[in-house]
Image (cartoon, rainbow, N blue to C red):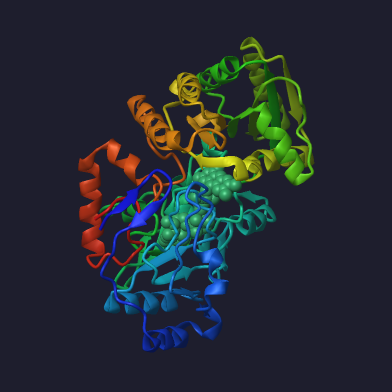
Amino acid sequence: MKLKSTGKKWEVDEMSYNKLNENLIDRIGEIVGEEGVIRDRDKMDDFSHDEYPLLDFKSFPDIVVQPRSTEEVSQIVKLAWENSIPITPRGSATGLCGGCVPIYGGIALSLERMDNILEIDEDNLLVTVEAGVKLMDLFKTVEDRELFFPPHPGDESAMVGGAIATNAGGSRAVKYGVMRNFVRGIEVVLPNGDVEWLGTKNVKDTSGYSLVNLFIGSEGTLGVITKAILKITPQPGATMTLVAIYENLEDAIGTVPEIIKKGLSPISIEFIEKEVIPPTEALLGKKWPTSEGEVHLMLIVDARDEDELMQIGEELVDICTANNATDVLVADTKEKQEEILDIRSNIYLALKKDVVEILDITVPPSRIADFVKRVRDLSEKYKIELLTYGHAGDGNVHVHMMKGGEESAYSPLRRELHEMGIEMGGVVSGEHGIGLAKKEFLKMMGEGKIELMRRIKRALDEKNIMNPGKIFDL
Ligand SMILES: Cc1cc2nc3c(=O)[nH]c(=O)nc-3n(C[C@H](O)[C@H](O)[C@H](O)COP(=O)(O)OP(=O)(O)OC[C@H]3O[C@@H](n4cnc5c(N)ncnc54)[C@H](O)[C@@H]3O)c2cc1C
């Protein structure tokens, strides 16, 4: 099986899967009920793509199936396994690398009807949810109990299952880490339909291989995540958002390692170039706190109480000022903080129509200034605008390749950017995953690692029915 990138389009080689026949479709309807099946192509458009912009790529499933329980998922997967039908799990399709696109047709398995929060275990600070729970609902439910679920990938409509399958990160990762750090256990349906619980509620667990970690970030290629036990924390006593204003990129980016070295651990350190703000303000009808300066750092800080918060805030202001910030603005009310985070989270959506591709190269935090400078050099070399913004605190500054230049430059530019990131000790994806879009770049990180992944995939899914064609070719 081969999937070839021609720079702009992806061509999928033929695979010898079976087609769904009327008999199988009837059996699927019996398992999930008629309302859990979509066959009408006109209603399948949403299931043929995700948020990845480059391809304009759509690939329709033969059928969309929306189970209501693990038992139903298991029966559907078993049926797919027995009949060699490809099956692609999907959450809210907010992914940015084509991960949930059913490129071989077959079954698109949507978890959207499995959206129950099953238990909030306040004594152990754990919540057990079905995989179709949206992050926004999880945030709200725990917040109502003065608890907190820290991971925050920008699009809150993403589902828990999708966020685990991509090991999503987001802007709060600087202090709290990524999804992996919040998953204690998962229930999975394996490619042959068997159901397993991996991981437990226990804090410590060295009882054999950490299979739960194998599934986190496996992008639906090893099985369907149906439930999860997630860690939550008490709500911070006080939070503050700072916006530091700079006249140039070097000073702004140069501030980041200084903050990290001091061990201050803001929740977020986001880097934003000025030109991306007005379109986002227009999209949301909200106002960013300043139009001064060329480049901004958005810093979110939390602490146990106001005194501790003020102390950290003052230290951050001092560091920013020492690194030539012309001003540092403070948002101390919840409303102002939410407005700033909302604008930051939606920059991508505001730019999307002009974006060729959003890249996810991540470098060690100490190399970000050098990385962004070299991105600018490549932008000049290829005469393609490359806007950078994102999670500066963890080296995950997203590079946005913008429309307007020569299309023939896209492919070599993408390649050179990824080569440069790897050469700087970075990785091709920090949080979005590999999906379809980054397969050719993952190869640059070493064939040995891919071969190990192939062996794991074959051991669990010898028929290659589970999200085939993603991450690597078999
Ligand atoms: C505006 C915007 C901002 C974003 N910001 C961030 C960010 O800051 N950080 C970040 O990490 N990501 C970000 N993303 C990307 C995206 O939101 C995340 O990748 C998210 O975790 C995907 O969740 P989903 O439910 O939409 O999954 P989908 O896109 O539906 O699927 C993603 C992958 O997971 C697999 N999958 C889905 N559900 C399951 C399941 N139950 N079992 C097994 N496999 C499954 C799919 O097969 C696919 O490979 C952003 C996206 C947008 C549009």
Residue at horizontal 38 percent and vertical 37 percent from the top: 428
Residue 63 visible to the viewer: yes
x then y, percent, for residue 391: 54, 33
Residue drawn at the location 20% of the way across and 41% of the way down: 448
Vertically, is 327 above or below 209? above
Q: Position of residue 134 (x, y in %)?
A: 58, 59
Q: Nearer the viewer, residue 222 or 196?
A: 222
Q: Tell me where residue 429 appears, x and y as whole percent.
A: 41, 40
- Observer able to see residue 151: no
Quadrant into which the N terminus falls: bottom left
Compared to 164, does 40 lie above or below? below
Is residue 359 or residue 254 the one in the foreground?
A: 359
What is the total number of numbered labels drawn onto the structure image?
0
- Give me the residue at 50% from left, 53% from top: 56
- Nearer to us in this view, 264 or 389: 389
- Tell me if 444 is positioned left or right of 401 in this view: left
Q: Quadrant of residue 303?
A: top right
Which image quarter: residue 319? top right
Nearer to the camera, 382 or 115? 382
Q: Quadrant of residue 440?
A: top left
Residue 464 rendering spot, x and y as whole percentages: 27, 64
If the image is split into quadrants, where does the C terminus sit? Answer: bottom left
